[in-house]
Image: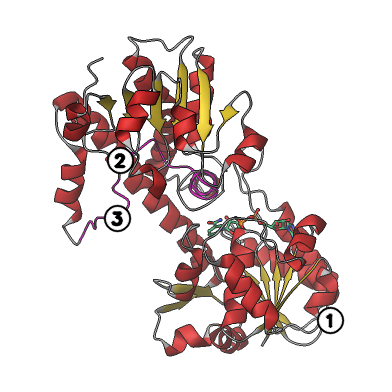
Amino acid sequence: MHIAMVGSGYVGLVSGACLADFGHNVVCVDSDQKKVESLKAGKMPIYEPGLAELVANNVRHNRLSFTTDLVGSVGKADAVFIAVGTPSRRGDGHADLTYVYQAARDIAAGLDGFTVVVTKSTVPVGTGDEVERVIREARPDADFAVVSNPEFLREGAAIDDFKRPDRIVIGIEDPRAETVMREVYRPLYLNRAPFVFTSRRTSELTKYAANAFLATKITFINEVADLCEKVGANVQDVARGIGLDNRIGGKFLHAGPGYGGSCFPKDTQALIKTAQDYDAPIRIVETVSAVNDQRKRAMARKVFAAFGGSARGKTIALLGLTFKPNTDDMRDSPAIAVVTALQDGGAKVHAYDPEGMEQAKLVLDGLTYFNDPYSCCAGADALVIVTEWDEFRALDLTRVKSLLTSPVMIDLRNIYDPAEMARRGFAYSDVGRGGKLAV
Ligand SMILES: NC(=O)c1ccc[n+]([C@@H]2O[C@H](COP(=O)([O-])OP(=O)(O)OC[C@H]3O[C@@H](n4cnc5c(N)ncnc54)[C@H](O)[C@@H]3O)[C@@H](O)[C@H]2O)c1
């Protein structure tokens, strides 16, 4: 099949490369000329494990190419995917669909023969209807079907998620599109991956319901962690104790600094807005979003507590800036709120992240960046772990202790053992494990 992927960001590039790997002929389109040039030169614009190799291999086999020419890429395509960004709209939190509709107009201009237009971007209920209307208005003569096929991949594990998905959700209104979509995902179909064929609106809502549910699970355990701190219980044991119940499941029950990233914050907001517009408010998600927003900044209070209530004049070493490990994505990372709150409280911040520092420099000011965890700790008054990169799980703690001016560690990801940290002489605090700071 010939496939055009419109938008070559985290989702478009991974999806395009994986579809090429399935044997399709894929052209990845992006309006960002620099991005396309860098891709053509074999340089990945994002960090995602395994992506550079996957892209190089499929380019070598002439199954994958890159262009800025959207209109020209559509004519030959059997399926055109829309994988552009749908950020929060400034001011009201609705999903900003400007990029989606612009892509739809450009696609309309290039359509030639029956083509399936697939929305992979996360879009509110009814966007598929509007995409169809936009294309129909521009090209009353065109033969096309608009499909919803939301993406569930996780950054950091994106290739595996795309190739071995828990499910593929496809919303169609025109039965001809089903044949094309089965062919697009043929290898997964043959491997008996679960397909959910449904209506377009159901498919669109399914994506938001999934993200809102996961955000709720995280926020639930975070609030349980807060209670654990007050009553002297251990949230990790609570999470295990409830997670072993199959009805609950153990995933997404890790207490921490609150969820961030390019999806959960904006998708919960967009769902809240849609639900309010349709007079069916989802109050539980409204609360989840509000609780999570406050939580990220509140994490800085754990640092202030380590110094008797104020960290003014202190230097804080911060490890991990991205919203999770194995990505360079800084969008809505909890680290942004933590760093800002520390700076507002008069502290200086030293920071290190294995992949995120270039992106961090675009959103955070006034930090000093270091090239490894140890130089970051040197001369600092406390160490804060914000993102659980593997390389932070096995730090040389003797060395860390000798580099810090006082042995204070605030572990926002619960990766160290409170008892061992106490044995090593650290004043150690965590999230919800009763690890009380005694400085
Ligand atoms: N990042 C994730 O983990 C993830 C997971 C599932 C779903 N999603 C959803 O997928 C969509 C894309 O997310 P992303 O993280 O890949 O975004 P991104 O910002 O990384 O990539 C979007 C790309 O689209 C390009 N673009 C915008 N308008 C264009 C146009 N008219 N023509 C061609 N290119 C255009 C941009 O230049 C950019 O490179 C969003 O709706 C997001 O919610 C993201």
Which of the 4 image quarters holds residue 80? Answer: bottom right
Type of amino acid at the residue the image marks with label 3: Lys
Q: Which residues are magenta?
A: 247-272
Q: Give the labeled residue for mark 3.
A: 251
Q: Was residue 253 drawn as part of the magenta stretch in this picture?
A: yes
Q: Is residue 399 magenta?
A: no
**Residue occupying the point 44% across, 38% down:** 289
Q: In this rendering, which labeled residue sits more in front, label 1 or label 3?
A: 3
**Mark 2 Cα-neighbour bin, 10 Å: few <14, some 14–19, many ≥20:** many
210 sits left or right of 308 in the view = right
As drawn, 397 above or below 51: above
Q: Three-letter amino acid code at disc 2?
A: Ala
Percent x, y of residue 380? 44, 21
| Quarter of the figure with the C terminus | top left
The circle drawn on residue 141 is 1
Helix or strand or loop: what does disc 1 sit on? loop
The reply to whether discs 1 and 3 touch (Cβ–Cβ < 8 Å) is no
Alpha carbons under labels 2 and 1: distance apart: 54 Å
CB of residue at label 2: within 8 Å of ligand 1?
Answer: no
Q: Which mark is residue 419?
A: none
Residue in the image at 64% along x and 26% along y: 365
Up/down of 92 relative to 248, above or below: above
Picture coordinates of residue 24, whole percent (x, y): 64, 85
Where disc 2 sits, the SS reads loop
Nearest to the observer: residue 209 or residue 5: 5
- Check residue 255 in the rendering and tell me which mark sits there, or answer none: 2
Whole-percent x, y for residue 434 in the image: 19, 29
What's the residue type where badge 1 is placed?
A: Asp
Front tag of 2 and 1:
2
Residue at 67%, 48% in the rendered image = 96
Q: Position of residue 39 (x, y in %)?
A: 73, 64
